[in-house]
Amino acid sequence: MPELPEVETVMRGLSPSMEGAVIIKAQINRPDLRWPFPERMSERLTGARVSRLKRRSKYILAELDRGETLLVHLGMSGRMTVSGDPLGQFVHDHPAAAKHDHVVFDMDNGARITFNDPRRFGAMDLITTDGLENHKLINVLGPEPLGNAFNESYLISALERKNTPIKSALLDQGIIAGLGNIYVCEALFRCGISPTRKAGQISKDRVASLVPVIRKVLQDAIKAGGSSLKDFRQANGELGYFQHSFDAYGREGEPCHREGCTGEILRITQSGRSTFYCGSCQR
């Protein structure tokens, strides 16, 4: 499932074609994805201007001039791609409709935004912009790891009494919004912290060291266009490239990248998910 860097990459790719533009046609090709679409979705979107595009956790949020915000979740296989972009950044001709093109937005600047989702685990909702922070998907989220509210003091306080493994704690969206399996594995590797350590037993200095490292891992991934492991594509249809820089994730049995370490990357299962780490230098 796309994590924060992938969603941020898609959001940035959509911005030139969506921000400030009017949706002249919203074509909804089925009644639902992961859950039913909101009532009169096509009617409520058609004619609306996208005032601002932003990201919260793993959600893309399109603020509309009608006082509503379109929430988009890509799910496991969802893609939002652009064609016919007037800025010349994308493919100029609109491709033929594909089987799993479930939602299509035609913009007044000539761009077409297509949401394709073969597995239909994605989702869309329309929320009053004033009530966005109270929405059930938003009000449970912790601070953004790239924002000012995520800092050393906050993370030390959030983890100091946690009896769960540090990896599980960092995946808790109520503690940090947007972090997923890939980037937690990478951040713990860079900090030399074992994913099996109980969060509340890690020293304050080591917990504090996670904050700049988490930010750096995410920034590196965004710069590389995210990680393409299976279905993820950027808004222009291209792959992300951060998977070529993994130190831990997916490298089971391979030599550790840390200078001076002779260990190899191990894989264990935590809460039903694969964890990758070096059994020698991560403690």
Image (tube, grey):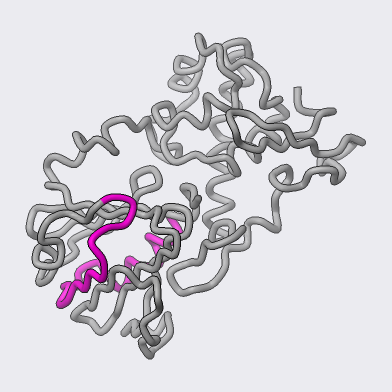
17 in the magenta segment: yes
Residue toward you, 170 or 266:
266
Which residue sits at x=32%, y=57%? 33
Residue 278 position, x and y percent, is: 79, 33
The residue located at (57%, 43%) in the rendering is 216
Residue 235 vertical position relative to residue 230 in the rendered view, above or below: below
Q: Is residue 262 left or right of residue 13?
A: right
Whether the magenta-drawn stretch holds residue 20 is answered as yes
Q: Is residue 89 above or below residue 39?
A: below
- What is the x, y in percent for residue 265? 80, 39
270 relative position to 5: left or right: right
Image coordinates of residue 157 in percent, x first then y, are 45, 14
- The image quarter in which residue 118 lies: bottom left
Q: Quadrant of the C terminus?
A: top right
Q: Residue at coordinates 42% horizontally, 61% vertically from top-left?
A: 78
Residue range of the region highlighted in magenta in the rendering: 8-35
Depicted 90 relative to depicted 194: above or below: below
Q: Residue 130, percent across and down?
A: 11, 42
Residue 60 at least partly seen: no
- Viewer-closest of 43 and 29: 29
Q: Is residue 272 found left or right of 54 in the rendered image?
A: right
> Does 113 appear above or below 11?
below
